[in-house]
Amino acid sequence: MNIFEKIKIDLDVKEIPTDSLAYIGDAVFNLYIKLYYFKKASAYNLHKKSQNFINRKFQAEILDLLLPLLNEEELAFVKRGINSKGAGKYGNDPSYRKSTGLEVLIGYLYLTNQQRLYELLKEVIK
């Protein structure tokens, strides 16, 4: 059993505000990356190494790689994130909009289909 299978929450994800899904997705993505590097880095270097992956530029690149693997519903949540009010926080920065789209996708999948989320995150690490 992995960390994504341990917590189950019964919510209607379509009613959760987009910015809240992005917040959840950001937390899950951060945790996943840090757990991945935990065995490969000392505590001193863990934050430094994980920051290479936890930034809007890299997250935008990840989304570009994942887009061909997504189904219609997943793409709808990505678009919701890209077009959200929170994604416009830095003006029209395409990287920030895409990273928000990725975070919304991760938040959505964390709450609805953790096995699918785990499959996609494994693709990210490759």
Image: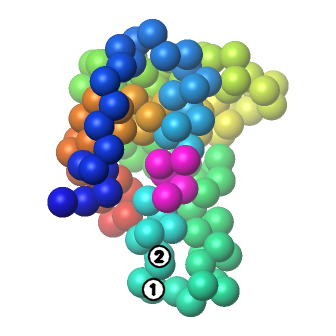
In the image: residue 47, left or right of residue 73 = right
State the image quarter where residue 87 is shown. top right
Magenta segment main secondary structure: helix
Structural crowding at the residue carrying mark 1, measured as other residues with C-alpha within 10 Å and reported as few (<14), some (14–19) or many (≥20) = few
Q: Which residues are magenta?
A: 27-31
> Which residue carries the number 2 mark?
37
Residue 40, numbered circle: 1
Numbered disc 1: secondary structure? loop
Give above or below for 50 relative to 57: below
- Quarter occupied by the C terminus: bottom left
In the image: residue 69, left or right of residue 27 = left
- Quarter occupied by the N terminus: bottom left
Look at label 2 and name its amino acid. Tyr
Give how far across and how far down residue 90 sits, in percent: 80, 31
Tell me which residue sits at (45%, 26%) in the image: 78
Look at label 1 and name its amino acid. Lys
The reply to whether the C-beta atoms of the residues labelled 2 and 1 are less than 8 Å apart is yes
Tell me which residue sits at (50%, 40%) in the image: 25
Give how far across and how far down residue 116 sits, in percent: 23, 41
Q: Nearest the camera: 33 or 71?
A: 33
In the image: residue 84, left or right of residue 65 = right
Give how far across and how far down residue 6 sits, in percent: 27, 50
